[in-house]
Amino acid sequence: MKGKDLATGEHISRPQPTGVAVELTDPRAARAELAGGKAAALARASAAGLPVLPGFVVLPAGADQPGADPERLWRRLSDGGRRPLAVRSSSSAEDTADYAMAGRFVSVLNVRGLDAFRAALRAVLESASAVEGPPAPMAVLVQPMLECRVGGVLFGADPVAGRTDRLLLSALPGGPDRLVSGAAQGESARLTPRGRPLDGTATDLLDRAELRRLASVARRTRRIFGAPQDIEFGFAADTGRLHLFQSRPITAMGPRPPRGARLLGPGPVAETLPEPLLPLEEDLWVTPLSHGLATALDLGGAAARHRLRALPVVRTVRGRAVADLALLGLVPPRSRVLALLNPLPPARRLAAAWRMGRLRGALPGLALALQADVDRELATAPPLVELTPADLVAALRWSRGVLLALHAQEALAGALLADSEEAGGGAAAALAALRHGRAEGLPDAALAAARPEVLALVPPSLTRPLRLPALAPTDGGPAPGALTPREGLRLRVRWVQEFQTRLVREIAKRSVAIDRIALLRWPELLDVARGQPLPADLAWRRPRPPGAPLPDAFRLADDEAVVASEPRGAGGEGAVGVSAGRVSGVAWDGGGEPPADAVLVVRHLDPALAPTLPSVVGLIAQTGSPLSHLAVLARELRLPMVTGAAAAVDRFPPGTRLLMDGGSGEIAVRRLTSEVCG
C-alpha cells in the first residue's frame, strides 16, 4: 500500500495491515476458531450484558471473511490516536478448556499512535511462532486502555483446593497486568459464591459491595460458559465501574477428596515398613499387617466389625505403607463434648475388655506360646535348597499366616499390657547383639545368622542386600533386659519377614532374577513356586519410582492424588501452596544446567521462566500470586509450586535437598539419604 508524506509530498511505502477486522459486537467475533479464545469469550460475555469494553478483532491472515480495515477501526477506537489502546493476543490455542497458554503470547499495553499500533500487531503475531507445538491461527484483540483504581484476578473456584464452593481473589492497585505477570503479589482472599470473605481473609482494596459485584460476575460467567472461570477485572479510577478484561476456563483444578475420605498417615507403620515397597513386598508384609491389626481391633472392640471388613487398616499409597488413622484411634474427636457423651469410644471399650480380663489375663501366655511356635518352626526348617515346590508353598503359607497372628497379638499387647520397668526392648537387645558381633569381627550376613536380634535394626527388603548400621566408637548402648511380650512378638515379626525373604530368593534362583520376582503378586508367587511358568508380561513390568515421602496425615482424591490434611505447611511465613503435588529434589537457582530433579527457587515469578518449567520438578518463589500466569501454567503441567516462601533464596541455596508440597505449602530441608526401591 502506498501513501503520501504530508510534510514532503513524497510517496512512501506503508506496511499492509494483516487480515481484516471485525468489532466485538459482530457475531463472528464470538467464534473461537476465527477470533481466538480470548476475543471470543469477551464477545460472548458482552452479548450477555457483562461489562466488557468495546473493541475489535484483527482476524488471522488467510481468514476468508469480509471485514473492515484494522486501521480505520483503530482511528475510531483510539479517537485518532489520542486514546491509548491494549493490543492483545487471541490465539485459537489460547484459553481453551484444557490449556490456558497463560502468558505465553505477547500483549502490548498503552499503545499510542499508528506506528506503535502497527508494531504492536507485528509483535503479537510474531509471538505465535515463539511457542512450541504446531502453529495455531493468531487473531489480535484491540481494546481501549482503562485507568484502574483496583485490578486483579478472580477464580470462580479454588483451583488449589479443588473446591467449587468458594472463589479465590487476588487484587492490587492499578490494572491486573502486574499481578498476572507475577511481578506483584497483591492481596488475596477466599470468598463465598456470594462474595463474603472466608476464614478471616479480606482485602482493604475492595469494599463489601464491590466484592458482591465481583461474585455476581463470577456466577454469570459460569452460567454463560458452563464452568467456573478465571477472570481478569478492573474497577475504573474515574467512574468506579467494574470491567471484565478476560474470562477463560479454569484449566487445572486441584484434586479434592470426596466427603468422608479416610485420613491416612505413615506414622503408626513407618517404623515397621519405612521404605517404598515393591508389589510382592506389599503382599508379603502389608496384607498380614492390615489383617492382624483388624483382628486386634475386632477382639478389643475398638472398631465396628463392618468397618473393619470394608476398610483396610493398612494399605499402600505410591508403594508406601500407610494406616487408617481413625481406625487406630489417632484422630481426635471433632467435638470433645460429644466424645464424652459417647458411651462406647474405642478407648473405653478396650478398658472394659481389660477390666473384665477377657484378654489381659490370657494374652501373656498366648504370646509366649506363639513365640515358641515361631522359634521352633524357624529352628527346624531344613536348608532351603532341599525344599520341594510343595514345601516352598507350605512354608510361604505358614509364614503369611503366622505374621497375621504376630501382628494381632503385638497390637493387643501394646494396648492391654503394661510394660515392666525392668523389661527391655527389642532395640536394646539388637544393639547389644550388634556390639558383640562387631567385636567378633563378623560380617553382616554371618552376624545376622548368629545373632538374629540385629534384624530389628533394619527394615525388610527382597532386593536390597542386608547392611547393618555402624556403631559409634563411644556407643555403649542400653543394657538389654528380658523382652516384654510385645517386644518379643515384634522381634519374631522381623524374623519371619527375613525367612520369607530367603524363601523368595530361593524361588528366584530356580526361576527368575530376584528384582523381577519382586514384581509378582502373592498368587503369582505361589504359582511360580509350584513350577508354573512366569507371567507373560513380567518382562514389561517396572518398579514404581520411589517418589517423595508422604505427608504425616492426608486424604486421597480419586484413590490416587494425595491431599495433605492441613491447608498450610512449613514453607515460611506466608507460604502458599499454588499447584498440588509432593516431590523431593535439589534446589536450583536457574543458572547453568539444572539437576535431574531440580526445584527452581526464585525471588519473583517472571514470565520468562515459562520455558524452564517442563525441565524442573517443582517451583518455589518468595513472592507471586497463586492466580498469576505462571501459577496457571504450573497447574496445567501438574508441577508442584509454592509462593510467598519468605527468604527462600537465602534459606535454600543451590544444592539443598528439599521436600516440597505444592498443595499445603510445606517446604522442608532433607538430609541426604538413599531411597532404593528395587
Image (tube, grey):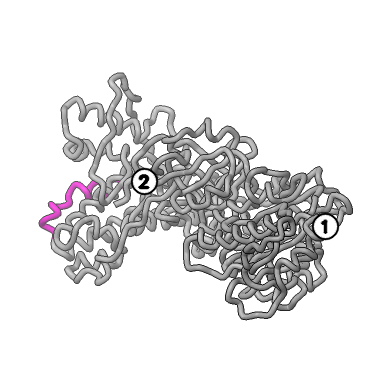
Taking depth in this image into account, of 111 and 452 the one nearest to the observer is 111
Give the Cα separation between the discs numbered 1 and 2: 74 Å
The quarter of the picture where residue 404 lies is bottom left
Q: Going by the image, does 449 lie left or right of 155?
A: left
Amino acid type for the residue under numbered disc 2: Ala
Q: Label 2 belongs to which residue?
A: 367
Q: Could you classify mark 1 by the number of other residues whose Cα lies within 10 Å: few (under 14), some (14-19), or many (20 or more)?
A: many
Precedes in sequence: disc 1 or disc 2: 1
Residue at 20% over, 30% down: 437
Q: Is residue 490 above or below residue 235?
A: above
**Segment colored magenta:** 371-387
Please indicate, yes or no, whether residue 546 appears anywhere in the rendered image.
yes
Pick out the residue farthest to the left: 386
- Outermost top residue: 474
Q: Examine the image and state in which quarter residue 21 appears.
A: bottom right
Of residues 638 and 16, the one drawn nearer to the viewer in this rendering: 16
Residue 208 part of the magenta segment: no
- Nearer to us of marks 1 and 2 is 1
Say which quadrant the N terminus sits in: bottom right
Q: Residue at x 32, y 22 (%)?
A: 475
- In terms of secondary structure, where does tag 1 sit? strand
Q: What residue would you read off at disc 1? A: 242
Q: Position of residue 536 (x, y in %)?
A: 24, 72
